Image: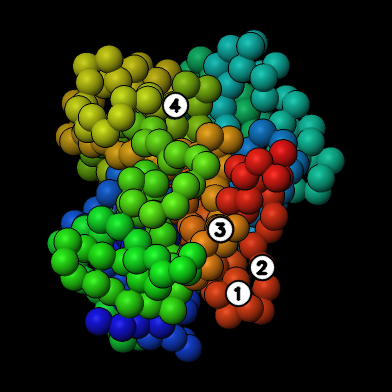
Amino acid sequence: MTTDVLIIGGGVIGLCIARELAYDHSVTVVERGRCGMAASNAAAGMLGAQAEAYGDDAFFRLCVESREMFPGLASSLLDETQIDVGLDRTGTLLLNFTEADIAARSERFAWQKAAGFAIEQLPAEAVRREEPFISTDVLGGFYLPDDGQVDNRKLVEALRASCEMRSVKIIEGTAVDRLAVDSGKVTGAFARDTRFSAGTVVLAAGAWGTSVQAGFELPFLIKPMRGQILMFRTAKRLFKHVIVGPRGYIVPRADGRVLSGATMDDAGFDDSITNEATAHLIESTAEISPSLGSLKPQEAWTGFRPYAPDRLPVLGRVPNAEGLILALGHFRNGILLSPVTAKLAAAELRGTGSMPTGFSPSRFYPAAA
Ligand code: FAD
Ligand code: GLY
């Protein structure tokens, strides 16, 4: 079959790009399993541009830009699909429980404040007034009014529905084995004996991104970084905000589910739920809220964050392969970064803009050193 754009991988990144490009291109998404069931299903859905930032750099600015795109994305998805993606911008609390936590976080407060981002220091009493189920050991923290959360599973469901309404062809249960390359130009891909021909191929296969045979050298590997999450359930919603403690976070959904996350380890594609991770998550939850931590977790799951060697996304064209755009390596922030990635990939493909150079695959090529 022939299409303008072939997207390999139907996670949040592939679907968001497909939806954007469907305005003016024929788009096909090829997904090995079911769309959205890999990392995009496992995530906590935090829109933690500020909560997860460590410096005022290009990555932080990209995260902020994407966070600001969520209200528009959520309302357009609601209009189109009637699916509410649970965008919640009641803000995030970043809490301290030890003097060392305070020391580690005060620097972040200083640079975010200096750079003009909304961040408010809260004494312990104010935290407890705001969130009565927080531990009495809390020493205080910061309120980040502009960070929040989205229900990532609903987001993927809505993106998929919107793609279908925009005539994106979605082919599930089909693994791409290799790219089709003719005289240095990527012209499609193969799944066993089936050839998909395309003007442009977008590789958005998450943690498996560099497992697809390219037929040429890619000088970097995307690795899976395993993350485990526990889900607790309370009869009604007990927490208003996403709460980031020093050793873990909790994300309260509107229906009383509370996600407690997340561990991180380099275990290849081993999707085991380990006793060690479960014990750590129960402990980090109890540190934030002893009453929540004393409940029995209702569910546990694992996902693989797509991790590039320098922890940054890999976005844009590959120097030695015309016709190929990479949208990989979103690591801990792929839900947050999905709208801006789609915007940038679409501009690159349409020739109306180019990806920020700091995230370009070129950075891994010797000439860039
Ligand atoms: P995926 O969702 O993994 O999608 C890739 C898709 O490609 C998969 O569906 C896969 O089946 C398909 N595929 C792979 N190989 C092939 C092939 N050969 N042919 C066809 N299809 C293929 N991010 C946030 O912003 N906020 C959070 O709070 C957050 N929490 C997280 C918590 C955990 C525990 C984890 C694991 C991740 C979290 N993340 C979070 C990160 C986020 O989930 C990822 O960055 C994001 O989902 C990556 O999206 P993706 O589409 O690139 O990958
Ligand atoms: N961003 C949350 C996580 O990766 O666990």
Give whichever of discs 4 and 1 has the lower sequence position. 4
How many labels sit on residues? 4
Residue found at x 30% / y 33%: 229
The percent position of residue 52, horizontal first and vertical second, equals 58, 38
Residue, disc 1 = 347
Return the residue nearer the eye: 200 or 125: 200
Give whichever of discs 1 and 3 has the lower sequence position. 3
What is the distance, in whole Å, between disc 2 and disc 4 at their CAs?
36 Å
**What numbered label is drawn on residue 248?**
4
Q: Is residue 58 left or right of residue 279?
A: right
Residue, disc 2 = 354
* Res 349 visible: yes
Q: Nearer the viewer, mark 4 or mark 1?
A: 1
Give whichever of discs 2 and 4 has the lower sequence position. 4
In the image, what residue type sits under mark 3? Asn
Q: Is residue 185 left or right of residue 100?
A: left
Query: Against 148, is 344 above or below?
Result: below
